[in-house]
Amino acid sequence: MRLLFLVVVPLVLLGCPKHAPNPAQGDEELLARYAARLEEVDSRFRMATGCPDRCQAAQEGCELARNICDVSARLPERADVQKRCAGAQEACARYNEGCSACQGR
């Protein structure tokens, strides 16, 4: 009986969830990671001397903007997240303008 107790109780305790994951917390982490990467891309874009580097940074920046807006679509009630999406889209537009400008030379 004691052996059964020593086996069953730990299994029950391990099987019980401590707390349910919060999807919004995961979205916050994603947004923070995307924002940090967008800052890096922005810095690379501004420092790029050649068109290929500038256009590569533009492509990466616009992909990050899409990712940020995908997360914001899941959190429509959060005005701060919607502003992040709008800011990321504006950055994407700047990147594309810079890429197009150097390709037109």
Image (cartoon, rainbow, N blue to C red):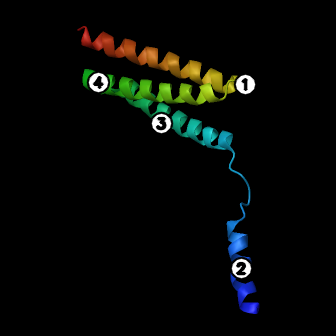
Give how far apart the Cα atoms at labels 1 and 2 are: 44 Å
The mark tally for this picture is 4
Q: Position of residue 8 (x, y in %)?
A: 71, 79
Mark closer to the chain start, 2 or 3: 2
Category of crowding for the residue at label 1, using alpha-carbon neighbours closer than 10 angstroms: few (below 14), some (14–19), many (at least 20): few
Q: CA distance from mark 3 to mark 1?
A: 24 Å
Identify the mark nearer the N-term, 4 or 3: 3
Residue type, mark 1 in image: Glu
Residue 70 at x, y percent in the picture: 54, 28
Q: CA distance from mark 2 to mark 4?
A: 66 Å
**Which element type, helix, strand or loop, lies under badge 3?**
helix
Mark 2 residue element:
helix
Give the residue type at disc 2: Val
Disc 1, SS? loop
Question: On the image, numbered disc 3 is attached to which residue?
Answer: 37
Q: In whole angstroms, how far apart are the C-alphas of marks 1 and 4?
A: 40 Å
Q: Nearer the viewer, residue 41 or 66?
A: 66
**Quadrant of the rendered image containing residue 81:** top right
* Badge 1 vs badge 4, beta-carbon distance below 8 Å: no
